[in-house]
Amino acid sequence: MSLTLETDVLIIGGGLAGCWAAIAAAEAGAEVVLADKGYCGTSGVTATAGPNHWWVPPDPDRRAQAVRERNARALGLADPRWMARIIDTTWRTLPTLADYYDHSITAGGVPHYQSLRGPEYLRALRRYAEVRGVRILDHSPALELLLHADGAVAGARGLQRQEAPPAGRDWTVRAAGVVVATGGCAFLAKLLGSRNNTGDGHLMAAEAGARLSGMEFSTYHTVAERHSTQTRSASYAFADYFDAAGRPIDTGTDPDVTLPLARALLAGPVYATLARMPADLRAILHQIQPAILLPFQRQGIDPFTQRFPITLHGEGTVRGTGGLRLADEDCQTDVPGLYAAGDAATRELIAGAVSGGGAQNSAWAVSSGTWAGQAAARLAHGRGRRTGEAVDAAGGAGLRPTQGKGTGMPQAAQLTRQLYDGVRSEMLPYDKILFRRAPVLRRSSDTLADLWRAARDHLAPGRDATARVRAREAAALVACARWVTASALARTESRGLHRREDAAALDPAQTHRLVSGGLDAVWVAPEGAAVSTQVA
Amino acid sequence: MIELIFADRCTGCNACVRICPTNVLEPGKNAPPAIARQEDCQTCFLCELYCEADALYVAPNCDEMVAVDAGAIAASGLLGQFRRDSGWHEWAGQSPNLHWRMGELFARAKAG
Ligand SMILES: Cc1cc2nc3c(=O)[nH]c(=O)nc-3n(C[C@H](O)[C@H](O)[C@H](O)COP(=O)(O)OP(=O)(O)OC[C@H]3O[C@@H](n4cnc5c(N)ncnc54)[C@H](O)[C@@H]3O)c2cc1C
Ligand code: SF4
Ligand code: SF4
């Protein structure tokens, strides 16, 4: 038995952006279904973290100044109007969580709305959405989009992986508007909370005809204790770093320590201590960020007096800026009726070529989710659900292999693993990602093209629910890796997060966004250019 | 990655199965949940936060499975610490949420 639903708005992904989109659509009067791969409330990178939102009071001068300062750091690729919009929407939207989140009351009796603890925040959003009547499908990853004959989105299909084991239960949701809020693509790095962020939404949207933008800006890294997922950078603001011989590592004056640490890690083990953290903060750290100390305590390490080994976890597009390109102010993609919100969308509009982590990205997730949800609801009211019309399923690689299992091709589980490992080894090594060079990028591009062909032609996962979800993830990871690599090759300069060892300077002639797309033939083109250049 | 479910503590409520974002666990038949897909575990500790019986132990190593001493862990007082520090369930009101002071970490580190 499969689950078939008709609704006004379907939200794919129930992290920060998906929840806010669902709430906004429901408040606009729409019937809403939200499907998450995991559990809406613990899934997504915010549920394990503690996002601080961009928070500027409605004083025109202060807001103008905040936008000016941030735009000056965006290296020419942001849009001040979008920045102003998210500041305003975030300011008006976040306090509506008050019935569901126990805000701290700070100086002057003002509730502290802007910096929230992840597990409590997502638990609150789930309740808020439920109270607004949103129907939540947990453990229900979307696998592909449905399209009308005119190219507009018609809904999606997926799998309820905890029902009817081991095969799971298929679901089909027909909807007037669909919001993709599947998060960034973390390429299976050990970034906290990112296991589900495999770029599924990017692939599904691209199959339906959407384009991407800014995929070269996908090099953000965060320090963590080695073998631990705790990529919480606040405590590491107090860190001092050492090499294996105990010599201090000079991390310079820039708060971003990624490059010096990556160079040191390429040469050998690196150690850190948090000895500079003042005693009063150490005493309350477990009440600021309860999870960060768990790995230390469980290994008997005192991070304030001892030195412990560290690593850098890559983040792919999560705290990079690339994602689905937006065609209008409602966050609609190039596909009619398909909206993108949060980290699944490009954040160049508000962050440009540098990371929007720390304040912009969360404000973006709240705002883009809110706009996309409202617009999808408007579309449903205006156009109706069109449920009588026949639709086509848009999914390909990892769902419907173009050829049978080729001779010499491994079993699906083994092929999936090879694709996972292949993507990891192109997208995670520091020397390939942080210190990009054309010959290495070209080799990655060839390797990834081979992986794509294997996925497209031969990946047939059978009926097991876990195998089906993993196969689709593998295809999405390869697709995202190809857009990243092609975009990195096309930007023959260094700008913000994108650094080319063989083109170290910023080239003013390349002050434009790079749009990318394509599945079998991947292409990249400057935004607005008439012709696209096929690069892989 | 998750390593242990203590049968003597587990009430079989299956909250952990439901809320684990990566679907690592499977409900047991008259038994505690099984760790069915350990390789998908993202070491997020959230199952510990949602388990009111403090019956789960997530080892901090996210890269490989490690040998753990169940007896020593049960005796260590570490079980349930995340819930306690977070002030969840019966700990409500006993461990304030000071997350709003996070900005201070950055600011004071910068000030030296
Ligand atoms: C450690 C860390 C700390 C951060 N701190 C800050 C901060 O202080 N300030 C700031 O501005 N930003 C911060 N960020 C960034 C911020 O958390 C993100 O911008 C925000 O979480 C994005 O929300 P999202 O909903 O787009 O993605 P996510 O929260 O990642 O949610 C994506 C959701 O989509 C679901 N999903 C994936 N695939 C499918 C599928 N096929 N079908 C259905 N569902 C699917 C996932 O299960 C997940 O629930 C931080 C990020 C990290 C990693
Ligand atoms: S949440 Fe705890 S008590 Fe409930 S089934 Fe899981 S381990 Fe057992
Ligand atoms: S640590 Fe996180 S991913 Fe691992 S079993 Fe627990 S809830 Fe699931």
Image: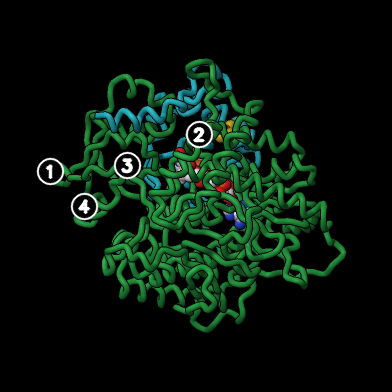
Chain colours: A green, B cyan
Counting residues from the start of the chain, the first of labels 1 and 2 encountered is: 2
Crowdedness near tag 1: few (<14), some (14–19) or many (≥20) residues, C-alpha within 10 Å? few
Q: Of tags 1 and 2, which is closer to the observer?
A: 2
In the image, A530 versus A43, the foreground residue is A530
Crowdedness near tag 3: few (<14), some (14–19) or many (≥20) residues, C-alpha within 10 Å? many
Counting residues from the start of the chain, the first of labels 4 and 1 encountered is: 1
Q: Name the residue type under label 3.
A: Glu
State the SS at label 4. Answer: helix
Give the residue drawn at x 50%, y 75%. A523
Q: Name the residue type under label 1.
A: Arg
Instruction: Name the residue that disc number 3 marks.
Output: A225
Crowdedness near tag 4: few (<14), some (14–19) or many (≥20) residues, C-alpha within 10 Å? some
Instruction: Name the residue that disc number 2 marks.
Output: A56
Callout 2: chain: A
Residue A414 locus on image (x, y percent): 49, 68
Q: Of tags 4 and 2, which is closer to the observer?
A: 2
Q: CA distance from mark 4 to mark 2?
A: 38 Å
Counting residues from the start of the chain, the first of labels 1 and 3 encountered is: 3
State the SS at label 2. Answer: loop
Instruction: Name the residue that disc number 1 marks.
Output: A247
Q: Name the residue type under label 4.
A: Ala
Q: CA distance from mark 1 to mark 3?
A: 18 Å
- Give the position of the C terminus of chain A as an image quadrant: bottom left
Say if labels 3 and 2 share a chain.
yes
- Residue extending farthest to the right is A388
Q: CA distance from mark 3 to mark 4?
A: 15 Å
Counting residues from the start of the chain, the first of labels 3 and 4 encountered is: 3
Q: CA distance from mark 4 to mark 1?
A: 11 Å
Give the residue drawn at x 77%, y 51%. A378
Q: Of tags 3 and 4, which is closer to the observer?
A: 4
Instruction: Name the residue that disc number 4 marks.
Output: A264
Callout 1: chain: A
